[in-house]
Amino acid sequence: MPYANLRPSQVILDPENPRLPDGTSSDRQAINRLLDDGAEQLINLAKDMIRQGESNPAELPIAIKSGSKYLILEGNRRFAALKLLKDPLLANEEAYQKAFKRIAGTGEAPKSIYTHVASSREQADHWIVLRHTGLNNGVGVKAWGASQIATHRRRNNKTIEAGTARSIMIANEMEEIYSTDDEILRLVQNVKREKLTNIGRFFSSDVLTALHLTIETDDSGEKVLYARHTASQLRDFFAWAFAYILNKSVDAYKNAAIRSDALREAGPRRPALADAFETPQPLRDVSSGSGQFLDESLDAEVDSTGDDESSEAGKTSAAADSTGTASTSGSSAQGTSQSQSAAGQQQQSERPRKAEAKPEKYLLQDLRLPHHPHRVQNLLKECRSIELGVFPGIACVMARVIVELSVSSQEALALSGASEKDSLKRKILSMLKYLDPEIEHPIKRDKQLAQAYLEASELGIEYLNGFVHNPSLIPDHHLARRFSQAFRPFLERIDTVL
């Protein structure tokens, strides 16, 4: 396909531009019709081109040869903006002339735009239709939803509207924490797609407080969810909450009083206060087990203060919260509290302590792939020395490298039926379908492979590619850990069939 750097003086605007259904007879008329159609947008486009020093490289204009010049079929607004920056008097209205003259004085406009030169209008039409008519069964442009836009802006340290930021943060936490729970993943993704901002409305400060949840900023500047219960203890509540958000209008949780009624409806799905930790911990770091046994120091602290008056008051309050009643008799309350405390201590002595799984510190920590080529095994050894919290950028790039090498070997391609020339996404999905023919079924799919499938079929793979090819994308340690956890079982499963 031929391409050319075209200057504004080399091109003429399309008199058959669909934005101007009545047609035009000259560039000047086309420019002023575009101004009539959206002067503010055209002015903003000119400002952006001056600020960036170039036209959007992700969307190339398309032209065809027309005599000694080039006829612009796609990108008329961009070339119109450049023509106005070079000669503001092309605008009929004085206000527009002054605006483009003022913008031109703020910097240097691009001298040319890199443009695809099609052989005919018919050849160009295929690409133009795909650009402007949506997804087209996957062939066209798939626009980002509100969730994806917010995620992209957060990852690039851009400002996000506060309510949306809270919504996307909570949704992302749920997807990471419950990455193998198909029910919650499906609910969260449906809410993100249909009612993203309602997540933040539901999980307002009063609801967070009632559930003993807080949003805090960690050492890297990321906002994370802290809890006084484990993810397994909160699981049923979160499943109920996201189903509630999905199936109810915002009127069902529009103020604190109504949200309080909704929480009562949740009933036993809410974990008991008696099972809570003494202090909040990052929810992603306490993914299973009972809060009473996660930290021996907490048990010791409770035991050492068991006879303390304030501790007894706290136990009485916890008992009242879990049963929904409060005793008005001091002696009765103390007796009840003491009996419950004794029962609780006996229960603790009978139940074995559970060792809580620690989050991965290193990329693909402890992963072994003995049946993979030696090159992959050697790289994997180096990966296991990359600290996710210290080198998230290297970790994300290397995660992509290991996955691509794994699915691209001749042995793997022979099993998956993919071609060496296929995209990484196609190779991963082909291998997943080989490993699990039900991988596309949200209920029947292998839960260990579910997260790898979600990453490959949605934006995860685009970000992995972007970390290699787009220097403006900045990975964080949460993403690095997510990719490491998502692709570990996938790599292990490939190794078993090689």
Image (cartoon, rainbow, N blue to C red):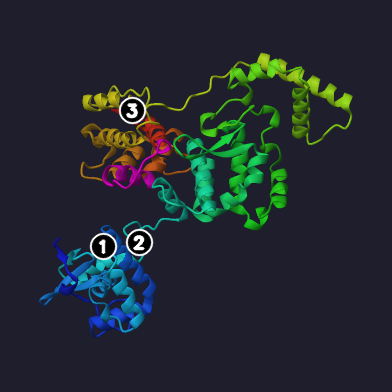
N-term mark: 2 or 3: 2
Amino acid at pointer 1: Ser
415 sits left or right of 352 in the view:
left
Dot 1 or dot 3, earlier in sequence: 1
457 or 53: which is nearer to us?
A: 53
| Residue at disc 2, secondary structure | loop
Distance from Cα at disc 2 to Cα at disc 1: 26 Å
Using the rendered view, name the quadrant where residue 463 is placed.
top left
x, y percent for residue 363? 36, 29
In the displayed structure, would residue 308 be above or below residue 446? above
* Residue type at numbered disc 3: Ile
First-in-chain label (2 vs 1): 1
Label 2 crowd bin: few (<14), some (14–19), many (20+), radius 10 Å: few
Residue located beneath label 3 in the image: 386
Badge 1 is on which residue?
55
Rendered location of residue 39, percent (x, y): 37, 75
Q: Nearer the viewer, mark 2 or mark 1?
A: 1
Residue at image mark 2 = 136
Left or right of 62? Residue 477 is: right
Instruction: Locate residue 183: give its quadrant.
Output: top right
Give the magenta range: 457-479
> Foreground residue, 443 or 66?
66
How many C-alpha atoms fall within 10 Å of the one at disc 3: few (<14), some, or many (≥20)? Answer: some
Q: Residue at x 11, y 77 (%)?
A: 67
* Mark in front: 2 vs 3: 3
Q: CA distance from mark 2 to mark 3?
A: 41 Å
Q: In which quadrant will I find the C terminus?
A: top left
Question: Which residue appears at 61% of the width and 38% of the height?
Answer: 213
Residue under the point 38% across and 26% down: 362
